[in-house]
Amino acid sequence: MSPGQDAGMASTVSTATSRRQGEKLSDRVYGDIIDRIIQGEYHEAQRLPSEESLAQRHGVSRPIVREALARLREDGLLRSHRGAGSFVCLRPNRAMLDFAPLESLADIQRCFEFRIAVEAEAARLAALNATDEDRADISAAFGLLERRIFENALGVDADFGFHLAIAHGTHNRFFADTLVSLQPSITYGQCLARGLGQRRPSFHLPEVQEEHRRLHDSIIAGEASRARLLMRQHLSNSRRRVFQG
């Protein structure tokens, strides 16, 4: 490798490292603001401190604060008014902190975002491509979910198995491979959602299972567009149930 190439490689590595560090810093700011909202330091409709004040408080640059604020807006926790700043518009479920460490919240949100994008397409393709054997596997996985609810069990194994059966039904191995590679992150979010749901089982579990039922039925019926929409709705609702209660 020539000196020029070596210097270029070093610059690329340095840039990548800086980017990863920046992401970690913005996650820390993101989590701290959520914590202050949950604890009531920032109330609904209250204006947050300025970007400059937040940057000083956290010892980071203003672009890192802006990235954290952008994520909070995307997650529906803040709204911004040009020239007026950022305001709290939603207080997440306080019980969430009983199940998840604060520093994990950003990753949970990002995992849900990724799943919505990937699994919605998986549902569409499964509706188009699933064989009779695939449909039987999806129905069996759904049946296991039903039994877990009857047993009053957390059912994370069955929940993941249902989504994995749908991924296998696409006949594109990369969907299933992706879910398996992300299983720790996915099941972490599922544990959180179901753990919170068990605090109000008469509402949460029937709602979730009805979403699974509609999704199952649309795939079995070969309704590709509907399956895609229902998967997006289900995962978006799961994210809402975790963060909003």
Image (cartoon, helix red, strand yellow):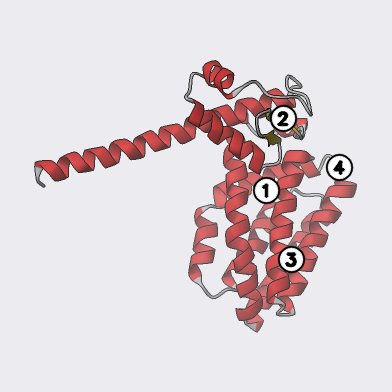
Upstream in sequence: badge 3 or badge 4: 3
Identify the residue position indicated by label 2 in the image: 87
Q: Of the residues tagged 4 and 2, which is closer to the observer?
A: 2
Amino acid type, callout 4: Arg
Q: Describe the element under mark 2 as helix, strand or loop.
A: strand
CA gap between label 1 and label 4 equals 16 Å
Identify the residue position indicated by label 1 in the image: 190
Identify the residue position indicated by label 3 in the image: 142
Identify the residue position indicated by label 4 in the image: 200
Amino acid type, callout 3: Phe
Give percent across and percent down for residue 174: 48, 66
CA gap between label 3 and label 4 equals 22 Å
Amino acid type, callout 1: Gln
Q: Of the residues tagged 3 and 2, which is closer to the observer?
A: 2
CA gap between label 3 and label 2 equals 41 Å
**Quarter of the image with the C terminus in it:** top right
CA gap between label 3 and label 1 equals 16 Å
Give percent across and percent down for residue 84: 68, 28
Upstream in sequence: badge 1 or badge 4: 1
Q: Measuring 65% from the left and 29% from the top, which residue is drawn there? A: 83
CA gap between label 1 and label 2 equals 29 Å
Q: Residue 177 carries which label?
A: none
In this view, the residue farthest toward the front is: 83
